[in-house]
Image: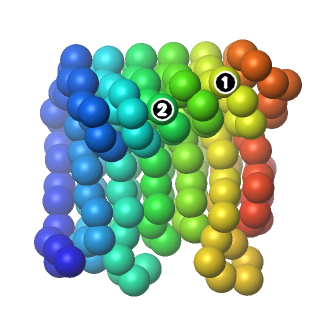
């Protein structure tokens, strides 16, 4: 297990193709803080796995992820075109998710057993094969499952190619939208 903090400021990750998870960032079983500020994630791909740009899988509900003022465009993964997040403390603000896609689902962001606060973001033109065009909220090992809050966001023009799918699909958990 890694107990380290990671801060990324004003960086660009562009045109990276990996065969596993996380085209730009792969953080597994860590317990530190990840801060991403004013960073661009463009044309990233996790061909056979999850999280085209970012994959985070925490250890023992200790990790924290905060993304502010960033841009995710034209990313692809088998599942979760932009990000696959299995972390209990997530804050995403003033960030764009545009033209992300997945071979299966969801087009932009996959939350698994997560708690997240998303504010003033744009999630647009995402595509997936089934289930969830933009965001999927799934599983959860506790009684409540996921707790996701979406506030003052624009979620538009997201599509599923093989099934009629909502922009946000909640398999288990609580979704608050305002």
Looking at the image, which residue is at 32% across and 18% down?
A: 43
Say which residue label 1 marks: 129
* Spot occupied by residue 62 in the image (x, y as percentages of width and height): 36, 80
Q: Is residue 123 left or right of residue 65?
A: right
- Colour logic: rainbow
Report the residue at 27% width, 76% height from top: 31
Q: Are marks 1 and 2 in contact (CB under 8 Å)?
A: no
Q: How many marks?
A: 2
Query: Where residue 91 sits: x, y (%)?
Result: 47, 58
Asked if 131 appears above or below 86 in the picture, the reply is above
The N terminus appears in which quarter of the rendering?
bottom left
Q: Is residue 61 above or below residue 66?
A: below
Along the viewing direction, whichever of 140 and 98 lies nearer the viewer = 140
Task: Locate residue 173: give its quadrant.
Answer: bottom right
Give the x, y percent position of residue 53: 34, 35
Please provide percent x and percent y for residue 23. 27, 35
Q: Which numbered marker is on residue 78?
A: 2
Residue at 47% x, 62% y: name it.
86
Q: From this viewpoint, is residue 48 visible?
A: yes
Q: Earlier in the sequence, mark 1 or mark 2?
A: 2
């Amino acid at each position: 297990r890694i107990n380290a903090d990671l801060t990324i400021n004003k960086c660009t990750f562009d045109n990276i193709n990996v065969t596993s998870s996380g085209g730009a960032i792969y953080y597994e079983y860590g317990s530190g803080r990840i801060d991403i500020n004013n960073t661009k994630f463009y044309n990233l791909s996790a061909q056979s796995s999850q999280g085209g740009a970012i994959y985070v899988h925490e250890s023992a509900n200790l990790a924290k992820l905060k993304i502010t003022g960033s841009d995710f465009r034209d990313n692809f993964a088998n599942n979760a075109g932009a990000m696959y997040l299995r972390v209990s403390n997530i804050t995403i603000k003033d960030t764009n998710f545009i033209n992300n896609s997945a071979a299966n689902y969801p087009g932009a962001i996959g939350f698994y057993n997560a708690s997240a606060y998303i504010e003033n973001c744009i999630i647009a033109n995402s595509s997936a094969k089934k289930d969830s065009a933009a965001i999927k909220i799934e599983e959860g090992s506790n009684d409540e499952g996921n707790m996701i809050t979406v506030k003052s966001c624009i979620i538009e023009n997201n599509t599923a190619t093989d099934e009629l799918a909502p922009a946000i699909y909640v398999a288990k958990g609580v979704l608050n939208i305002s």
